[in-house]
Image (tube, rainbow, N blue to C red):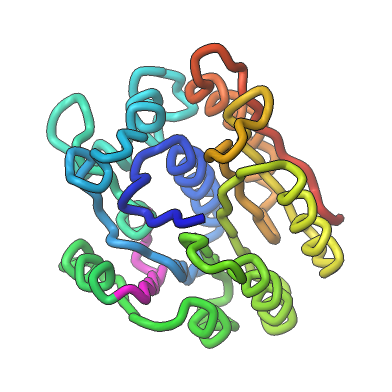
Amino acid sequence: MNYRHSFHAGNSADVVKHSLLIALVRALQLKESALTLIDTHAGCGLYDLNGEEAGRTGEATQGVLRAFADRNPLLNDYRATVEAVNVGAEPTLYPGSPRILTQLLRPQDVLILNEKHPEDAYALRGAMRGTPAAVHERDAYELWLAMLPTRTPRGVVVVDPPYEQTDERARITATLASAHRKWAHGVTVIWYPLKDRAAHLRWKNKLRRLSIPKFLSVEHWLYDSDQPGIYNGAGLFVINPPYVFTQGLLPLLEALRAALAPEGHRGELTSCWLSE
């Protein structure tokens, strides 16, 4: 499955991913100690929703535009990060995770971005000009391990690959196992697309066998039953989520489900622990 950020900017997966990422970082920032934020597959950083790639799919109409039409206050923080890069009532630009994380930075925090694709890395440097972010152009999985443990006492690693390679899930599984051995207390967020439940269950079972404590799974299934051969939703794995984040998760998930459910479908947005 090829899931390049530029083709899917602002879709329902982005709304869920970025809403939860904002809530997670905000929860961690309740403590004063510094955070290192690492984005291993950073993409371009900023996307034109009317551009050729995002315009070709038109997925923002079922994502960010729905979130803006639904005025639930639980989505205010998400909407504010999108409004920050736009002029006017309706967004025409969409901030990727790098631009969202930049908005969340405190003076003591550190932001490290990585993008392997040369063209996207060039665009990322332009999008992050004037910010304190460090931008790398390396293999994501090599960088993930090289940056651990973080220099600050606490940190978050965001892993958001395009799933272009057939071994992407295997590399994530192996790298996560190694990363956990180096940095057992760190927070890791792994995004994934959902195509069919059976294949996803097999991967979850492999991850469960890693026996990592505090391993949270959040799944957003758009349709009431699988639609063969198409994108059916997306989810996040979150390792070591803070207590404040998990306590506020269910109301946020329900707000997102209601805002993003396709016409004729209720949708499903749930969370569960893979291990305790």
In the rendered image, the vertical position of residue 9 relative to residue 187, given as above or below: above
In the picture, measured across the screen, residue 37 lies left or right of residue 249, that is left
Q: Position of residue 241 (x, y in %)?
A: 67, 54
> Hey, which quadrant is residue 8 in on the image?
top left
- Image coordinates of residue 3 in percent, x first then y, are 44, 54
Residue at x 66% of width, y 40% of height? 219
Q: Is residue 108 shown in magenta? A: yes
Snapshot quadrant of residue 246: top right
At which x and y percent is residue 86?
Answer: 18, 39
Could you tell whether 111 is left or right of 245 in the image?
A: left
Residue at point 57% right, 71% down?
A: 154
Q: Is residue 126 left or right of residue 109?
A: left
Residue depicted at x 71% and y 48%: 217
Q: Residue furthest front?
A: 229
Q: Nearer the viewer, residue 79 or 139?
A: 139
Q: Residue furthest top?
A: 264
Magenta span: 104-117
Q: Is residue 133 magenta?
A: no
- Pick the front one: 2 or 121: 2
Of residues 173 and 189, the one nearer the viewer is 173
Left or right: 210, with 119 as reference point: right
Q: Which residue lies most toward the left here?
A: 87
Q: Position of residue 189 (x, y in %)?
A: 58, 59
**Which residue occupies the foreground of this view, 243 or 122?**
122
